[in-house]
Amino acid sequence: MDVIFKRVTVIKKTEKDVAAYDGLVVGTPIWASKMSPAVRTYVLQNKSHLRKVVFFCTYGGLGREKALREIVDISGQSPLALLEVSHEEVLNAGYVSKVEKFVDELGK
């Protein structure tokens, strides 16, 4: 229900300060066309310290575009790179070239 109602949750305080880094990789599973509550909480708690971001998500069905737009909206950042990997791609190794492209983009 937290996913459906876009609720935040309690997460453990991170050991590293995101403000100390030039960039951040944010990943989430997509559930009901939304990011996970833990990722929502983390992004909301740290959005004022985000500089450059890249996003990745895993999904089993529809809704990834909507969820990724939501991450962009709440973070206030346009990602420098983006990776979307479906359950089907994991099963048939179709994700490999996508991950390689994503890693190349991160290196730029």
Image (tube, grey):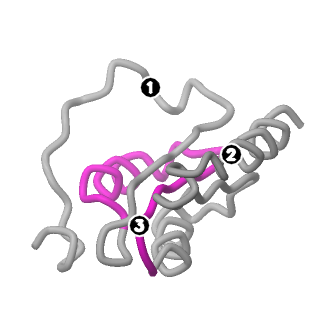
Percent x, y of residue 73:
52, 73
Task: Decide: few, some or many residues near mark 2? Use Cα within 10 Å; few <14, some 14-19, many ≥20.
Answer: some
**Foreground mark, 3 or 2?**
3
Q: Is residue 38 magenta?
A: yes
Task: Decide: few, some or many residues near mark 3? Use Cα within 10 Å; few <14, some 14-19, many ≥20.
Answer: some
Question: Which disc, if any, is residue 52?
Answer: 2
> On the rendered image, what quadrant is the C terminus found in?
top right
Question: Looking at the picture, which amino acid does disc 1 mark?
Answer: Asp
Residue behind mark 1: 17
Of the pair 107 and 12, the residue shown nearer to us = 107
Task: Decide: few, some or many residues near mark 1? Use Cα within 10 Å; few <14, some 14-19, many ≥20.
Answer: few
| Residues tagged 3 and 2 counted as in contact (Cβ below 8 A) | no
**Foreground mark, 1 or 3?**
3
Q: Residue at x 24, y 29 (%)?
A: 13
Q: Is residue 49 magenta?
A: yes
Of the pair 87 and 1, the residue shown nearer to us = 87
Callout 2: helix, strand or loop? strand
Residue extent of the magenta highlight: 35-62
Work out how far the residue at label 1 is from the one at label 3, CA to CA, in angstroms.
Answer: 32 Å
> On the rendered image, what quadrant is the N terminus found in?
bottom left
Question: Which disc, if any, is residue 60?
Answer: 3
Percent x, y of residue 87:
46, 58
Sequence order check, earlier mark of 1 and 3: 1
Question: Looking at the picture, which amino acid does disc 2 mark?
Answer: Lys
Above/below status of 15 relative to 95: above
Q: Is residue 39 left or right of residue 90?
A: left
Q: Is residue 59 left or right of residue 65?
A: left
Q: Residue at x 50, y 56 (%)?
A: 57
Callout 1: helix, strand or loop? loop
Sequence order check, earlier mark of 2 and 1: 1
Sequence order check, earlier mark of 3 and 2: 2
| Residues tagged 2 and 1 counted as in contact (Cβ below 8 A) | no
